[in-house]
């Protein structure tokens, strides 16, 4: 049990640094460039992981159709999610973007109802409504000042959460090995972003400092955090371990304050509390949930 919480704690720590790392990298590159360089390290590290654990042998049983399906179910989470989140983070405060990003658990519930035909209950409707109201509260200061750029960024972050909700539902529907699926998905994302950057003439060679930033983003916040989270959920009680994920946005606020020197508005605090409260409302409905919190 100690290992369970150790693995979960490491994942939470790495995830909490996403807002700061992303904002710093977006200061030099656009969202597609940041994703391109980051997924290179994410995909490469997952190849190393699967080879080291012998998990790579499972690929031998995969057909061309399996590769294609794995790619399709993975792209909403490894491509579209990051494209939208990074775009949103570039337009608003890192803390605001990360808070709105935490709509993804509610989106996972919504798309489980749409794609997996799970029952939509009153509790779920209330939870979804609360979480969206939380987003309105987070951006209410910008609404009052009619800040169109920040509001567009918030919309991109919502699209990112929607993409991740679709991703988690699709992963539940198709029971492929998660680390293999993620490896294939990151590889596909790297190819797509390479093509997009090449078409725009935006391929680049990062400096040493930037390379370290991309390596941290890809290896630690993407590959290692996701892998350890899956292991933690496999070793412990899903409900208890999953609830730990909601420490992440609060811890992220600490990093954005200390490193980026962002001032935390009362709107962000209240909005975050509302969003997390909505998530807990729907979690209480399930005695032993097995939904999308397994990969993030």
Image (cartoon, rainbow, N blue to C red):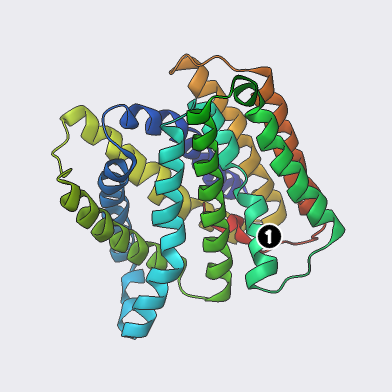
In the image, taking residue 2 as reference, residue 127 lies left or right, namely right
Specify whether 245 is left or right of 193: right
Q: Outermost residue toward the right? A: 122
Asked whether the viewer can see residue 237, the reply is no
Residue 185 at x, y = what percent?
36, 63
Quadrant position of residue 68: bottom left
Q: State the count of labels.
A: 1
Depth check, front residue: 171 or 54: 171
Give the x, y percent position of residue 260.
44, 18
Which residue: 25% across, 33% down? 212
262 sits to left or right of 116: left
Residue that badge 1 annotates: 110
Front-most of residues 192 and 283: 192
- In terms of secondary structure, where does tag 1 sit? helix
Which quadrant would residue 37 be assigned to in this image? top left
Q: Is residue 37 above or below residue 79?
A: above
For the residue pair 80 and 39, the one nearer the viewer reads as 80
Residue 147, given in percent of the width and then of the height, sits at: 54, 24
Q: Is residue 261 above or below residue 4?
A: above
In the image, is residue 232 above or below residue 180? above
Residue 180 appears at what percent x and percent y?
Answer: 38, 68
* Label 1: few (<14), some (14–19) or many (≥20) C-alpha neighbours in 10 Å: many
Left or right: residue 70 compared with residue 43: right
Image point (67%, 64%), residue name: 290
Could one spot residue 162 in this view of the protein? yes
Q: Which residue is found at the position 59% from the left and 17% from the top?
A: 264
């Amino acid at each position: 049990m100690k290992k369970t919480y150790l693995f979960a704690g490491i994942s939470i720590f790495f995830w909490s640094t996403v807002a700061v790392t992303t904002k710093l990298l977006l200061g030099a590159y656009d969202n597609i460039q940041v994703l391109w360089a980051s997924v290179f390290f994410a995909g490469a590290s997952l190849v190393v992981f699967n080879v080291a654990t012998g998990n790579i042998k499972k690929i031998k049983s995969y057909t061309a159709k399996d590769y294609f399906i794995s790619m399709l179910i993975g792209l909403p989470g490894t491509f579209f999610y990051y494209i939208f989140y990074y775009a949103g983070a570039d337009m608003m405060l890192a803390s605001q973007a990360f808070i709105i990003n935490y709509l993804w658990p509610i989106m996972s519930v919504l798309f489980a109802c749409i794609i997996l035909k799970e029952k939509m209950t009153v509790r779920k409707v209330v939870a979804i409504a609360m979480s969206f109201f939380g987003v309105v509260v987070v951006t209410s200061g910008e609404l009052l000042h009619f800040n169109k750029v920040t509001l567009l960024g918030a919309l991109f972050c919502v699209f990112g959460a929607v993409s991740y909700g679709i991703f988690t539902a699709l992963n539940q529907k198709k029971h492929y090995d998660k680390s293999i699926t993620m490896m294939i998905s990151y590889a596909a994302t790297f190819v797509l972003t390479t093509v997009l950057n090449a078409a725009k003439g935006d391929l680049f060679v990062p400096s040493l400092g930037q390379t370290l930033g991309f390596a941290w983003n890809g290896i630690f916040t993407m590959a290692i955090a996701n892998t350890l989270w899956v292991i933690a959920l496999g070793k412990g009680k899903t409900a208890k371990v999953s609830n730990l994920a909601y420490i992440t946005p609060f811890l992220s606020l600490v990093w954005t304050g200390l490193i980026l020197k962002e001032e935390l508005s009362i709107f962000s605090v209240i909005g975050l509390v509302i969003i997390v409260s909505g998530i807990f409302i729907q979690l209480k409905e399930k005695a032993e949930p097995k939904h999308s919190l397994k990969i993030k």
